[in-house]
Amino acid sequence: MSNAVAAGASPRAYLFVPADRPERYAKARASGADAVIVDLEDAVAPAAKAGARDALANALDEAAPVVVRINAAGTPWFEDDLELCRHPGVAGVMLPKADGIDAVCSAFEACFKDVLAIIESARGIEEARNIARVPGVVRLAFGSVDLALDLGVDCDPDGTEDELLHFRSQVVLASRLGGLDAPADGVSTAIDDAVRLRADAERARRLGFGAKLCIHPRQVAAVQAAFMPDAERVAWARRVCAAFAAAAGAAVAVDGQMVDRPLHERALAILRRAGGTA
């Protein structure tokens, strides 16, 4: 993990880097991403899997640990990938195609590292609440591209992915019920479309996600900004907290709006996200 977020805070921007491109590892670490994910799965061709794993093994550094996206359970590379994840330079395991508790348990028990489970199939959506309760799982991630493929969903070319709204909300709900951090939303594939990226990240935040997966260093800053409350929202939260404290916890009017305990809790959450206090 990096120092881009305060100690104890959850990452907002995860950046993928292909495992078979070790010359890019340093650039990924220097990108400002809250966590770097070295990808042994989708980014690496089958014939290059073993070489990519060896390259990663040679580059792992306990002083700069990374998350590793391993290959899915049932593939020929799963066990060897998990063996590599025992290395102290691995901060956590990202498990793709998480569609039941068995694979998740195997991933955790093989190396006792934090597990980030990607929900990206119909079965995964069905099992998300159970997966979120498995010891060792710290976060769910939403695999929008693979899920759409599995479901046969044809998303509108406008990029809004309204067709996946229900399934995104299911992952948010499962995370909350499992007591996990708010989940990480899937990637935005339009690398050079800053407007689309910002809209995607803001949609994720509004839906209850706490982070987003990035596929290029240029996406990192915009994603981090989208998950930080703006100055106007922070100022509102401070007014609410001050008024609520002055009223000794009783309901009080702020900016013409009645504020009671739930709104006070929302204001406190905004200030925590902003790195401040009431």
Image (tube, helix red, strand yellow):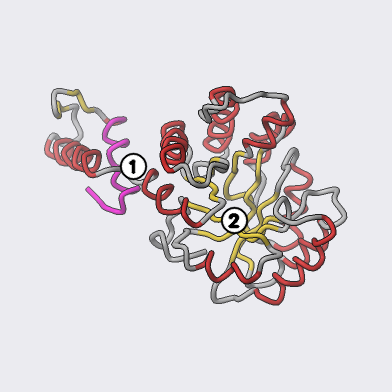
As helix, strand or loop, the secondary structure at mark 1 comes to: helix
Q: Is residue 243 left or right of residue 4?
A: left
As helix, strand or loop, the secondary structure at mark 2 comes to: strand
Q: Which residue is found at the position 35% from the left and 46% from the top?
A: 228
Q: Which one is nearer the viewer's eye here, 220 or 208?
A: 220
Residue of label 1: 269
Is 275 within the magenta?
A: yes
Residue 173, how many percent across, how many down?
A: 54, 31
Q: Amino acid at mark 2?
A: Phe
Name the residue at the front extreme: 192
Q: Quadrant of residue 190?
A: top right
Residue 122, how many percent across, how many down?
A: 72, 29
Residue of label 2: 16
The stretch in magenta equals 262-278
Q: Which residue is found at the position 57% from the left and 27% from the top?
A: 157
Q: Label 1 neighbourhood size at 10 Å, few (<14), some (14-19), many (20+)?
A: some
Q: Which one is nearer the viewer's eye here, 136 or 218?
A: 218
Q: Which one is nearer the viewer's eye here, 268 or 12?
A: 12
Residue 61, how many percent across, how many down?
A: 61, 76
Q: Label 2 neighbourhood size at 10 Å, few (<14), some (14-19), many (20+)?
A: many
Residue 244, how many percent across, how many down?
A: 18, 36
Q: Amino acid at mark 1?
A: Ala
In the image, residue 231 sits, relative to residue 41, either above or below, namely above
Q: Is residue 115 left or right of residue 10?
A: right
In the image, residue 38 sits, relative to residue 56, either above or below, namely above
Q: Which residue is found at the position 67% from the left and 66% from the top?
A: 21
